[in-house]
Image (cartoon, helix red, strand yellow):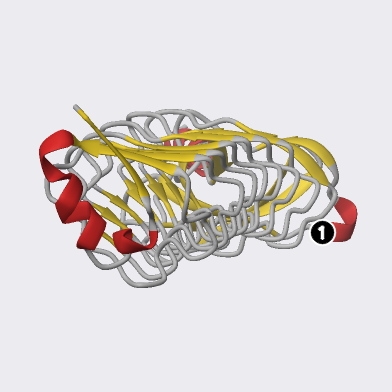
């Protein structure tokens, strides 16, 4: 009888899943929604994972939904990151639905997704890496929600159809090349929290007709607005002319109206970069 009971207990124990959590760097593959993904554990003994597709670009198209969870050995893992270059050159993808668990999109994650039109930005998404959407030429809009606190260099470079990008008060700096080549962008409006605009940040935004700068901007990098040929007016509420290079405004017509604080018109008129403009209006 004891032998039978022991055998039964051992059988039951063998049937119970081990539920052993993987360590940092460990990974597993799983197919969800017809796409095989690799899930890599980010922190040792934690259930947070970085997702990268295994199924190649030729077999993925249309609208896709990134999973929020994956199961392995009885443990549920939460997707918090999309890996570097994960969907790079997946040219057949037209829209992406991101999970509410996502906190980071790594460098070049969706670069070269030339058919991508829409993507959501769920909280608590906080980090968008360098060149994350580089060359997504069909992407029309992107909402920088309040949870996003870090944008990488060139994140939207070459997004030719992007018509609007609204910066929330969480940003203090516009990274280098952020919207370079966004020829569909109609207006460039910088909130009061922005203190620096990086090199080439809005270079070749050839459809932008207006540049609005609030009162906290301190500097603008080389070629920041170079090639914005269609700009018809600039307004800057900063008392001291923001520092810029000789080529910061290259290509913008010199005779457009530039509205600045009334008491500082002469400072702007002779400041480097600003001195290319001839028509100043004192206001504010």
**In what quadrant of the picture does the C terminus appear?**
top left
186 to the left or right of 257? right
Comparing 17 with 108, the one in front is 108
Q: Quadrant of residue 80?
A: top left
Residue pictured at 17% horizontal, 51% vertical: 266
Q: Is residue 72 above or below residue 33?
A: below
Residue 176, quarter of picture = bottom left
Instruction: State left or right for residue 182 relative to residue 242.
Output: right
- Please name whichever residue, 165 or 109, is drawn nearer the observer in this view of the structure: 165
Query: Would you say 51 lies left or right of 201 here?
Result: right
Residue at far right of view: 58
**Residue 170 at what x, y percent from top left?**
26, 36
Q: What residue lies at 52% left-to-right and 56% top-to-bottom?
A: 252
SS of the residue under disc 1: helix
Q: How many marks?
A: 1
On the image, the x and y values in percent for residue 53 come to: 68, 56
Residue 12 in the image, given as x and y percentages of width and height: 51, 35
Instruction: Please say whether residue 98 is visible from this viewpoint.
Output: no
Q: Residues within 10 Å of mark 1 (few under 14, many from 20)?
A: some
Rendered position, 147 above or below 231: above
Residue 58 is at least partly visible in this image: yes
Residue shown at the point (22%, 53%) measured from the top left: 268
Location of residue 55 with respect to 150 vertically, above or below:
below
State the residue in front, 153 or 193: 193
The residue carrying mark 1 is 57
Residue 13 position, x and y percent, is: 47, 40
Q: For this rendering, which residue is in front, 202 or 133?
A: 202
């Amino acid at each position: 009888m004891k032998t039978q009971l022991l055998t039964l207990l051992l059988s039951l124990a063998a049937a119970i899943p081990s539920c052993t959590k993987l360590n940092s760097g460990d990974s597993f593959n799983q197919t969800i929604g017809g796409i095989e993904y690799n899930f890599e554990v980010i922190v040792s003994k934690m259930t947070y994972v970085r997702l990268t597709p295994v199924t190649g670009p030729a077999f993925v198209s249309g609208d896709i939904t990134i999973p929020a969870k994956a199961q392995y050995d009885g443990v549920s893992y939460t997707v918090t990151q999309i890996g570097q270059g994960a969907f790079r050159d997946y040219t057949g993808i037209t829209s992406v639905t991101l999970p509410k668990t996502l906190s980071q999109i790594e460098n070049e994650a969706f670069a070269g997704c030339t058919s991508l039109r829409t993507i959501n930005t769920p909280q608590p998404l906080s980090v968008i890496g360098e060149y994350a959407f580089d060359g997504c030429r069909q992407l029309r809009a992107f909402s920088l929600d309040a949870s996003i606190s870090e944008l990488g260099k060139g994140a939207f470079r070459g997004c030719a159809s992007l018509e609007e990008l609204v910066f929330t008060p969480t940003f203090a700096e516009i990274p280098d090349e952020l919207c370079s080549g966004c020829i569909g962008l109609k207006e460039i409006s910088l909130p009061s929290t922005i203190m620096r605009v990086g090199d080439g940040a809005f270079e070749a935004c050839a459809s932008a007709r207006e540049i609005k700068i609030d009162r906290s901007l301190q500097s603008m990098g080389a070629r920041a607005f170079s090639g914005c040929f269609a700009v018809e007016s600039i307004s800057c509420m900063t008392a001291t002319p923001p520092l810029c290079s000789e080529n910061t405004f290259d290509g913008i017509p010199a005779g457009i109206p530039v509205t600045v604080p009334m008491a500082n018109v002469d400072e702007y008129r002779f400041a480097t970069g600003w001195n290319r403009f001839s028509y100043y209006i004192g206001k504010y």
